[in-house]
Image (cartoon, rainbow, N blue to C red):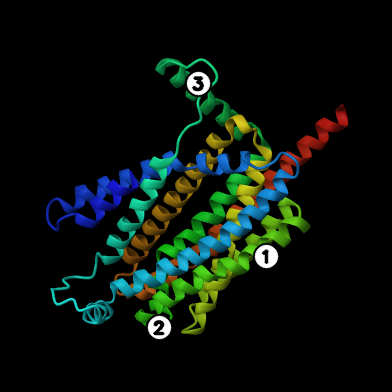
Amino acid sequence: LMVVEMSVFAFAPVGVWLFPLLVMNRVLSGMAEACASGADEALAYDSLPDEGRAERWRGVLATLMKWSSGGFFIAMTAGALAFDRQFIEAAARWVGWSGAIGSTTRWPIYLTLATSIPALICALAMREPPSKGKQETARQTLRSAMANILGAARFVFRDPRVRLLLLAAMLFDSLVRLFLTFGSNYYRLIEIPEFVNGFLGSFYALLGFLAAGMARRMGSRFSPAQAFFLVAAFIFTGLLGLCLGTPRWGVWVVIPLGLSMPILSFYVSSYLNEWTDSKIRATVLSFRGMALNMGYAAVGIGFACLVSSIRAASPSLSEGAIFGKALYALPTTFALGWLGIALFGSLKKAQFLARAGKT
């Protein structure tokens, strides 16, 4: 699915077919993410020894964060260079290429497509171990899958810890991802030159190395509630900084927001795997992916509607001023959401203590 998705993106012709092909690309991307979401992580977690599995998994996550940060740094740097026509022309002259370069707009997409092919080869090389039990029919397999989905849904909605974890993750992830989406608009607002965007993206990637050590130490010292409070403080500080819009110096918000995203991912994966039974772990992790995407979609649509309403109410404002006014909604939304989650958690804790007192 990833190869087909990137092929559609890379070779879509400009014209009437562009929009439907891009819609197909998004559908294929969602299908690919849905197929992989949760399964790989659950397999990795279950492959660890039972004794000390939770702590071992935190070590795996910290190592993965460092490798991912390195890979993301290389990808951001390579993508920025591939997008630069002057660099591509200089590289072509250096290797003796005399043909036409053409537009460099899609070169980063071509590189992504190239990396998807080795991933496909590795996936095709995997083999399922021979089954020792009786083979299920297609109907039995479908029935088992549906029962697994329903069991995971019941677990998610009935376990107060998991509900609070996913609600907090939806709130945190959606607002940070929204910043990543309009990052170039914010850099333009604070008068950062366009060519610096690639360097900021690479710097953002390298923050994962620092976040890995911080998350590991915080996870061993603090309870889940304390850990999420610290992540909330990081995000709220960064969102308040966005509202200031300080020319040039406003770029500091990349640090708290850049640290919060990998630390959040670390805690959500750590606690969700620890609290979930192996039989439904992959499905529950898929629910996590779905919940985060739903939260991001809701916040993104809400922010777009807010920008449109400001533009309609004040048509004389510039696009930069409209964007700057809309930013004030982000820390407000975060504060109200975090307050609601905290009240919900306090209520559930009081109910639990009341039931424990009666018994």
Q: What residue does disc 1 label?
A: 214
Q: Residue drawn at (53%, 55%), measured in percent from left and top? A: 173
Query: Nearer the observer, disc 1 or disc 2?
Result: 1
Identify the residue at horizontal 33%, vertical 51% (top origin): 117
- Which numbered disc, 3 or 2, marks the residue that appears first in the sequence? 3
Give 175 or 289, whichever is nearer the viewer: 289
At label 1, the amino acid type is: Met
Identify the residue at horizontal 60%, vertical 48% (top origin): 269
Q: Nearer the viewer, residue 277 or 233?
A: 277
Relative image position of residue 328 (x, y in whole percent):
49, 67
Give whichever of discs 1 and 2 has the lower sequence position.
Answer: 2
Examine the rendered structure and indicate whether residue 42 appears above or below residue 221. above
Callout 2 amino acid: Glu
Q: Which residue is mark 2?
A: 191
From the viewer's perspective, is 186 left or right of 281? Answer: left
Which residue is at the front of the view, 97 or 215? 97
Q: Position of residue 183 (x, y in %)?
A: 42, 69
State the CA–CA distance, disc 3 to disc 2. 56 Å
* SS type, badge 3: helix
The residue beneath circle 3 is: 144
Mark 1 Cα within 10 Å, few/some/many (few <14, many 20+)? some
